[in-house]
Amino acid sequence: MKIKLIVLSVMFFLLYSDTYSQKIKHSVGGTVIVLGAHVKTPLRGTVFYREYSFIMEEVALTYFPRINFETGNNTAFSIGIPVAVGAGIASDANNDNSGVYFSYDVSAIADYNIGKGATETTEKRFGYFLGAGFSYGYVNLALTTDLNKISSYGPLIHAGARFGIGSSHGITTGLYYKFGLESMKFTTVGIQVLADL
């Protein structure tokens, strides 16, 4: 069901772009994601718990389409659906146990954009944005630990800057912070570096 929702969302953006190509923006690049939580697991046969901090770093390829609704000469409100997919090597804190991971993260984000990247006509070489949204992330860890499949969802805040390169392209750097609503209460920090197409 989640995969179908992702596919339908991306298809919506692609169909919308055929009709309103001057309003849709595409960015591609990478995201470094840090996922963390304070974990409390019961010890078998006792009333005691084992507590530890779980931290995982991921590197993901990212595609970020967004639709801009221009509100002025240099400002726009945008709605975007960034999709990040990653795979790599993972290990525990002591490097005693290593394996591979596969992950994906899908968000719906509304931003207010000023300057570069906000409108087609702006001549600004620098811009910035601030917004919020909701995100779902999944990680499948091939490790012999209690946490081998992780799902996290919750609201996020999103901010960043854009820098002009050439006449129409640019670089976007962004940061988001997600507050997990699931029982583990994962917190997620993402750092994006994207090329604006």
Image: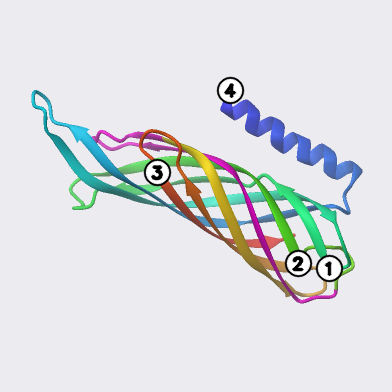
- Above or below residue 48? Residue 88 is below
Is disc 2 in contact with disc 1, using a CB cutoff of under 8 Å?
Answer: yes
In what element is the residue under mark 4? loop
> Mark 3 or mark 1, which has the lower sequence index?
1
> Mark 2 or mark 4, which has the lower sequence index?
4
Q: CA distance from mark 4 to mark 3?
A: 22 Å
Number of numbered markers: 4
- Whether residue 10 sits left or right of residue 54 in the image: it is right
Q: What type is the residue that disc 2 sits on?
A: Ile
Q: CA distance from mark 3 to mark 1?
A: 37 Å
Residue 19, image x, y percentages:
91, 42
Q: Nearer the viewer, mark 4 or mark 3?
A: 3
Determine if the magenta segment contains residue 125.
yes
Q: Which mark is residue 186?
A: 3
Q: Which residue is mark 1?
A: 74
Q: Which residue is mark 2?
A: 114
Q: What type is the residue that disc 4 sits on?
A: Met
Q: What type is the residue that disc 1 sits on?
A: Asn
- Above or below residue 84? Residue 176 is below
Q: Main secondary structure of the magenta part?
A: strand
> Counting other residues with Cα less than 10 Å from the Cα at mark 2, is it few (<14), some (14-19), or many (20 or more)?
many
Quadrant in the picture for the N terminus: top right
- The residue nearer to you, when weighing 178 against 116, is 178
> Mark 4 or mark 3, which has the lower sequence index?
4
- Magenta range is 123-150
- Above or below residue 72? Residue 53 is above
> Mark 4 or mark 1, which has the lower sequence index?
4
> Counting other residues with Cα less than 10 Å from the Cα at mark 3, is it few (<14), some (14-19), or many (20 or more)?
many
Q: What type is the residue that disc 3 sits on?
A: Phe
Is disc 4 in contact with disc 1, using a CB cutoff of under 8 Å?
Answer: no
Q: Which mark is residue 1?
A: 4
Q: Residue at x 73, y 47 (%)?
A: 79
